[in-house]
């Protein structure tokens, strides 16, 4: 045993031992306090519990952020050349099906009688207008979002890929059984068009295009409508678009609803999983028109020559470990500083309070306050 220990002296002041352990001890970069000079009390335990809870909370937050990954958006010129574009439409209009005329005309001059390719089901307007989630376009989608590209704010790559898994094979929902008078019409289905600028028109029978049917009375015009679905590309019912579940109403018989759509090809990817679809931004310019003009619902769409790539990425395990170490060490170091500052402030406050209580004795004044003995 060392001479310091034999004489009950503090071994902390003993010289370093000889040999390699003693030489390494001189390079110790982590100073240590002898247990003889350390004390434990309740306040230190409270700070320790607080720092542990803070470290666990921040560690959990980092793990959740790493599990969700982060999204990156990149715009580039679309390299692929596609000649066709699918349009998916599901809308309800407050007019009988026999009074509607549906047509598509694109920039190449092709005209498609969309009414022959889409399905029409008689329905009741009241069964649709009160459904949950139906809103006006100017109010934005429930939970955030609006008329911009991408729809709602809750649409993330993981949600879109999960919703698109096998979703392109799903069909449109069935038309509910009519309750009451069938004074409205549900028009739904998919159209395959040329991938060029075009116009999609829903007008009244005998107005806007040559029609051999009977001229329709103007008093029955009512182009109030609900758009349940309007998308471009493969039909994924779970994907949210700006015009989905929007309603527009009017009391005027001659009213023109005009929507301008800017379609952007979009590629969602996470690892090896990819989904190619289209998003769009929409602008509405609707107004009352004169009797010499054509009322109806008009969709004018334009295909942008750019490609939006939305990629979900996740950092490596080593980067995650480095962040966790930084978080925990930062909490411990910062907590240690705060603990020392709080202790120093408490000591200063205690000394100041003790000086005030002992001022009468130190100043030479007696208990009575006059400084003289009886």
Image (cartoon, helix red, strand yellow):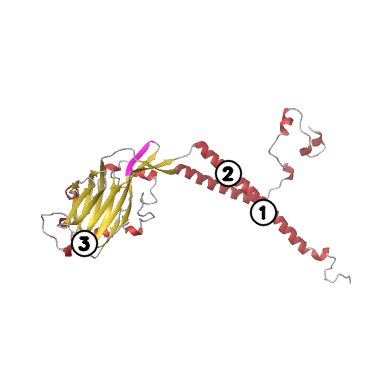
* Residue 113 shown left or right of residue 360 in the figure: left
Alpha carbon separation for disc pair 2 and 3: 65 Å
Picture residue at 72% right of the left edge, 57% below the top: 348
The region drawn magenta spans 272-277
Tag of residue 35: none
Disc 1 to disc 2, C-alpha distance: 21 Å
Q: Main secondary structure of the magenta part?
A: strand
Q: Is residue 213 above or below residue 55?
A: below
Please provide percent x and percent y for residue 2.
79, 33
The circle on residue 328 is: 2
Residue topped by disc 1: 342
Q: For marks 2 and 3, give the one nearer the viewer.
A: 3
Snapshot quadrant of residue 363: bottom right
In the depicted structure, whether residue 39 falls above or below residue 81: below
x, y percentage for residue 274?
Answer: 36, 39
**Element type where label 1 sits in the image:** helix
Residue 224 appears in the figure: no
Labels 1 and 2: the sequence-earlier one: 2
Q: Quadrant of the N terminus?
A: top right
Nearer to me, 138 or 56: 138
Disc 2, SS:
helix
Does the magenta portion include 273? yes
Residue ID for mark 3? 222
Relative to 277, is 373 on the left or the right? Answer: right
One can see residue 35 in this view: yes
Q: Horizontal and vertical percent for residue 126?
A: 24, 61
């Amino acid at each position: 045993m060392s001479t310091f220990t034999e004489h009950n002296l503090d071994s902390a002041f003993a010289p370093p031992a000889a040999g390699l352990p003693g030489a390494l001890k001189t390079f110790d970069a982590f100073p240590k306090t002898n247990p003889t000079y350390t004390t434990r009390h309740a306040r230190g335990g409270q700070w320790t519990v607080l720092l542990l809870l803070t470290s666990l909370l921040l560690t959990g937050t980092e793990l959740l952020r790493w599990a969700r990954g982060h999204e990156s958006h990149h715009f580039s010129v679309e390299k692929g050349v596609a000649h066709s574009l699918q349009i998916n439409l599901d809308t309800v209009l407050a007019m009988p099906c026999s009074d509607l005329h549906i047509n598509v005309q694109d920039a190449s001059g092709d005209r498609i009688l969309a009414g022959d390719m889409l399905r029409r089901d008689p329905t009741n307007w009241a069964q649709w207008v009160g459904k949950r989630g139906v809103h006006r376009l100017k109010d934005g989608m429930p939970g955030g979002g609006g008329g911009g590209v991408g729809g709602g704010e809750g649409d993330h790559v993981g949600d879109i890929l999960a919703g698109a898994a096998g979703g392109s094979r799903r069909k449109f929902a069935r038309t509910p059984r009519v309750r009451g008078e069938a004074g409205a019409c549900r028009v739904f289905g998919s159209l395959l068009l040329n991938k060029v600028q075009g116009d999609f028109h829903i007008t009244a029978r005998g107005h806007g295009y040559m029609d051999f049917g009977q001229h329709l009375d103007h008093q029955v015009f009512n182009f109030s409508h609900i758009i349940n679905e309007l998308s471009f590309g493969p039909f994924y019912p779970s994907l949210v678009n700006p015009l989905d579940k929007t309603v527009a109403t009017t009391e005027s018989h001659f009213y023109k609803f005009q929507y301008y759509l800017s379609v952007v090809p979009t590629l969602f990817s996470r690892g090896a999983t990819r989904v190619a679809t289209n998003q769009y931004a929409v602008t509405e310019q609707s107004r009352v028109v004169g009797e010499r003009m054509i009322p109806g619902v008009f969709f004018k769409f334009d295909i942008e020559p750019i490609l939006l790539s939305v990629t979900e990425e996740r950092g490596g395990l080593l980067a995650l470990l480095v962040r966790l170490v930084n978080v925990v060490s930062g909490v411990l170091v910062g907590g240690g500083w705060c603990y020392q500052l709080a202790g120093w402030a408490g000591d200063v406050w205690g000394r100041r309070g003790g000086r005030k209580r002992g001022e009468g004795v130190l100043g030479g004044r007696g208990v009575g306050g006059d400084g003289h003995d009886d």
